[in-house]
Image (cartoon, rainbow, N blue to C red):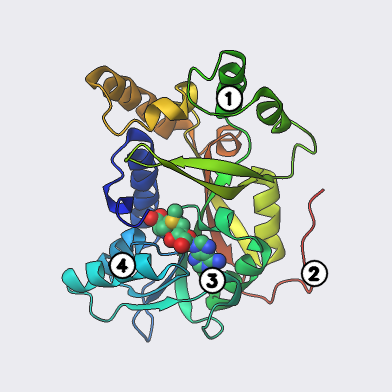
């Protein structure tokens, strides 16, 4: 998606990016009284959308991503904005090439963890690189949302919403255990009209919070994204050229959503789950892997 990632203009992505951006601005002001320049680690930095925001807030940015083509865009973007100190490396989040406690904050959005096969290792690596007391922002794909309903309806009604999923697949998302996530083959629509299929892990909100806690990261704030906006099917909201009426309806729904999406159970019912977590000051439990069953 390197050619179009920065031009994703549909209502769905714009709302998601804006929500992440607002949380960075509101919750991630650089800590005061540091003896060094604040450092932000952007894991799965992609084309550097959040790297740029963090740099503009005063952080020295370290961006890490496996995709060299995306990292090249990020590097260019930050240099163009004058942030020549930003460092980027092509590396796997499962083995971050960084020292312990190097970062004052971490961003891992987009939803990077949902793309990583061994996401538990990536979480442990993020926790290792964050300094005690530092905050991290995660965005992961959520398991429970209204798209489940739209997918079933779509399968019963001859794919009229374009989810391209047969009924058994749509129903399989409802299988227990309900508080544990699972992986799906997700079809990413491209603006060209083509699509790319990728495995994507969906998380249950309570499961993700528990996994964070197991690595010594304590969830402090949660939001659900596309809880209310998903009253409209995501396939419609991914239209790159939304009509005026659709844009007006979406604006109303998203402003309703912003009023309630930090409150349970809406925090757990988003297509994306947004979590701010703080690294405990003490060493985390020796518990190697948190299991949530
Ligand atoms: C959808 S993009 C998000 C980019 C950016 N954070 C944003 O929100 O625009 C997900 C990113 O995760 C990266 N990624 C996937 N697996 C990774 C891994 N194992 N280690 C590091 N980055 C990874 C992808 O290359 C991609 O850039």
Instruction: Report the number of discs.
Output: 4
Q: Secondary structure at mark 4?
A: helix
**Residue with the mark numbered 3:** 133
Report the disc number at residue 74. Answer: 4
Spatial CA distance of label 3 from label 2 is 20 Å
**Residue with the mark numbered 2:** 287
Q: Tell me which numbered mark, 3 or 1, is placed earlier along the sequence.
A: 3
User: Which image quarter: residue 184?
Assistant: top right
The answer to whether 172 is drawn above or below residue 46 in the figure is above
Spatial CA distance of label 4 from label 1 is 35 Å
Q: Tell me which numbered mark, 3 or 2, is placed earlier along the sequence.
A: 3
User: Which image quarter: residue 9?
Assistant: top left
Q: Tell me which numbered mark, 2 or 4, is placed earlier along the sequence.
A: 4
Q: Position of residue 266 (x, y in %)?
A: 56, 33
Of circles 2 and 4, the one toward us is 4
Circle 1 crowding by C-alpha within 10 Å: few under 14, some 14–19, many from 20: many
Report the disc number at residue 151. Answer: 1
The residue at the point 54 percent across, 46 percent down is: 222
Quick one: which residue is furthest to the top in this view? 157
Spatial CA distance of label 2 from label 1 is 38 Å
- Given residues 277 and 46, the one toward you in this image is 46
Q: Secondary structure at mark 3?
A: strand
Q: Secondary structure at mark 2?
A: loop
Q: Position of residue 179 (x, y in %)?
A: 74, 41
- Given residues 290 and 112, the one toward you in this image is 112
């Amino acid at each position: 998606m390197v050619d179009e990632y920065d031009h994703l203009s549909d209502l769905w992505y714009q709302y998601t990016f804006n929500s992440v951006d607002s949380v960075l601005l509101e919750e991630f002001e650089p800590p005061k009284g540091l003896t060094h320049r604040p450092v932000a680690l952007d894991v799965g930095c992609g084309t550097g959308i959040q790297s740029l925001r963090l740099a503009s807030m005063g952080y020295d940015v370290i961006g890490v991503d496996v995709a060299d083509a995306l990292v090249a865009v990020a590097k260019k973007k930050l240099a163009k904005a004058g942030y020549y100190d930003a460092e980027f490396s092509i590396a796997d989040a499962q083995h971050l090439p960084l020292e312990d406690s190097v970062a004052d904050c971490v961003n891992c959005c987009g939803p990077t963890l949902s793309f990583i096969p061994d996401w538990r290792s990536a979480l442990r690596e993020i926790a290792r690189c964050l300094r005690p007391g530092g905050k991290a922002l995660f965005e992961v794909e959520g398991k429970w949302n209204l798209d489940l309903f739209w997918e079933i309806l779509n399968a019963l009604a001859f794919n009229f919403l374009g989810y391209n999923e047969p009924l058994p697949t749509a129903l399989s998302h409802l299988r227990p255990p309900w508080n544990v996530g699972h992986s799906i083959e997700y079809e990413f629509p491209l603006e060209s009209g083509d699509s790319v299929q990728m495995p994507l892990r969906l998380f249950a909100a309570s499961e993700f919070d528990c996994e964070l806690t197991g690595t010594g990261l304590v969830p402090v704030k949660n939001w659900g994204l596309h809880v209310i906006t998903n009253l409209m099917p995501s396939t419609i909201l991914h239209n790159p050229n939304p009509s005026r009426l659709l844009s007006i309806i979406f604006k109303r729904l998203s402003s309703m959503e912003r009023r309630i999406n930090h409150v349970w159970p809406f925090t757990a019912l988003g297509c994306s789950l947004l979590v701010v977590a703080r690294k405990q000051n003490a060493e985390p439990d020796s518990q190697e892997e948190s299991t949530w069953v």
